[in-house]
Image: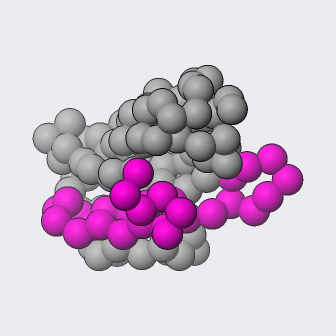
Amino acid sequence: QVQLVESGGRLVQAGGSLRLSCAASLRPFSSYSMGWFRQAPGKEREFVATINSSGGGTDYTQSVQGRFTISRDNSKNTVYLQMNSLKPEDTAVYYCAASFLIGTTPRDSAYYYWGQGTQVTVSS
């Protein structure tokens, strides 16, 4: 059974930083591109960042460009989301997801496996 387990979410003040982690039971992990998505209360789930299977290619939604960094460690089956300069509008449940595609994609329909999410709350 494939599992994606997110961790690292918590309450943080605006301007602060957090690093989210997602541990995956996928084998081989290096065959999957990975993504981070988020869903704020009352809003639809939205794309945040994606990284290709090798880790050599990334893409971000415009609102997080320059503040968030997605990375992966294929030896640890883990993908990360470093979030800096956090804003109250970043408050959401953050989900990691895995796609069979090797390249990056922002389309949530391309992601087959999803984690349960981790709550990030940014106070003003």
- Residue at position x 29%, y 76% from top? 103
The vertical placement of 28 against 91, above or below, is below
Residue 77 vs residue 7, the one in the foreground: 7
Picture quadrant of residue 10: top right
The vertical placement of 40 against 99, above or below, is above
- Residue at position x 58%, y 33% from top? 14
Whether residue 19 is visible to the viewer of this picture, yes or no, is: yes
Picture quadrant of residue 37: bottom right
Q: Identify the image quadrant of the C terminus.
A: top right
In the displayed structure image, the side of residue 96 where residue 40 appears, left or right: right
In x, y percent, where is residue 113? 50, 56
In x, y percent, where is residue 120? 60, 34
Q: Residue furthest right?
A: 42
Magenta run includes residue 91: no
In the displayed structure image, the side of residue 32 where residue 50 appears, left or right: right
Give the colour scheme of this rendering: one colour
User: How many numbered marks are there?
Assistant: 0
In x, y percent, where is residue 29? 25, 52
- Residue at position x 41%, y 51% from top? 67
Whether residue 34 is visible to the viewer of this picture, yes or no, is: no
The vertical placement of 2 against 63, above or below, is above
Residue 123 vs residue 27, the one in the foreground: 123
In the displayed structure image, the side of residue 123 where residue 24 appears, left or right: left
Magenta run includes residue 51: yes
Residue 70 vs residue 83, the one in the foreground: 83
- Residue at position x 53%, y 75% from top? 107
Q: Which residues are magenta?
A: 39-67
